């Protein structure tokens, strides 16, 4: 099958509590690296990566926070026009999981596209410590009509899949892809 000639740009957001691994997931996806020393201080506006899904080529502009999420001071412009969002919690931190509701309501307040596709990612599954079961994550995702995957930015597990499945769903959603 011939690939799409038009390169559609999608705005993807990564949100969630500070320290859950948002920047690490992004770095693993875009550069295939993991740096336990530096990850915590990395703050970029966004990174760009081209992804082919089902013969469609999409240019992803993935927005990370530079630490503003710590004070819940992400501005409306951060959310504006996004087609997809990755909401991250840390499976070794119940606290990061219980904050998901607050993140979803902030998203609802500021997202300008009603059909925005949501992916819930339970990160850090490589750790021995676990406070949130896979089942709890799955239940939360189903309740809020989100895609769900468990992942590890450290070992790579689930990272590529998280982005691919999100983009696949965006492509299938009328009004998001044909912009
Ligand atoms: P952010 O604040 O959400 O952007 O989180 P960071 O990406 O800065 O990560 C916070 C800390 O968690 C850093 O020390 C990372 O090295 C660590 N971390 C991130 N992802 C993982 C993971 O999948 N497994 C483990 N064991 N540690 C991780
Ligand atoms: Mg970060």
Image (tube, grey):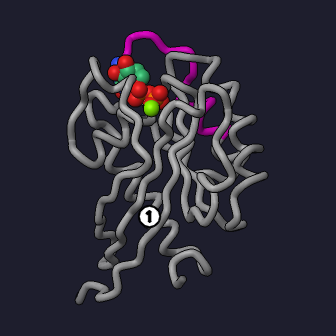
Question: Could you tell whether 139 is left or right of 90 in the image?
Answer: right
Vertical placement of 80 versus 22: above or below? below
Measuring from the top left, give residue 129's x and y in whole percent.
45, 10
Q: Is residue 59 magenta?
A: no
Measuring from the top left, give residue 66's x and y in whole percent.
48, 35
Of 2 and 108, the residue lying toward us: 108
Residue located 38% across and 58% down the image: 164
Image quadrant of residue 82? bottom right
Q: Mark 1 points at which residue?
A: 167
Residue located 59% across and 52% down the image: 78
Residue 45 at least partly seen: yes
Q: Is residue 133 magenta?
A: yes
Which part of the image, by quadrant, shows the N terminus? bottom left
Question: Could you tell whether 81 is left or right of 31 in the image?
Answer: right
Measuring from the top left, give residue 127's x and y in whole percent.
37, 16
Which residue is situated farthest in the top direction here? Answer: 129
Secondary structure of residue under mark 1: helix
Residue 126 at least partly seen: no
Which stretch did the figure color magenta?
A: 127-140
Of 80 and 27, the residue lying toward us: 80
Question: Could you tell whether 38 is left or right of 170 in the image?
Answer: left
> Which quadrant does ligand 2 occupy?
top left
Residue located 41% across and 35% down the image: 43
Vertical placement of 163 versus 123: above or below? below
Residue located 44% across and 64% down the image: 167
Is the CB of mark 1 within 8 Å of ligand 1? Answer: no
Vertical placement of 11 versus 68: above or below? below
Image quadrant of residue 126? top left
């Amino acid at each position: 099958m011939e690939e799409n000639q038009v390169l559609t740009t999608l705005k993807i957001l990564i949100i969630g509590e500070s320290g859950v691994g948002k920047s690490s997931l992004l770095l693993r996806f875009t550069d295939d690296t993991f740096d336990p020393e530096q990850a915590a201080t990395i703050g970029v506006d966004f990174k760009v990566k081209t992804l082919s899904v089902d013969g469609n080529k999409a240019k992803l502009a993935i927005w990370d926070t530079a630490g503003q999420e710590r004070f819940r001071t992400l501005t409306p412009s951060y959310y504006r026009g996004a087609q997809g969002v990755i909401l991250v919690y840390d499976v070794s931190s119940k606290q990061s999981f219980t904050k998901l509701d607050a993140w979803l309501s902030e998203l609802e307040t500021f997202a300008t596209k009603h059909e925005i596709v949501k992916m819930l990612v339970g990160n850090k599954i490589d750790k021995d410590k676990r406070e949130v079961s896979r089942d709890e994550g799955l239940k939360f995702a189903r309740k809020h009509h989100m895609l769900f995957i468990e992942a590890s930015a450290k070992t790579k597990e689930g990272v590529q899949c998280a982005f691919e499945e999100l983009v696949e769903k965006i492509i299938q959603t009328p009004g998001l892809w044909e912009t």
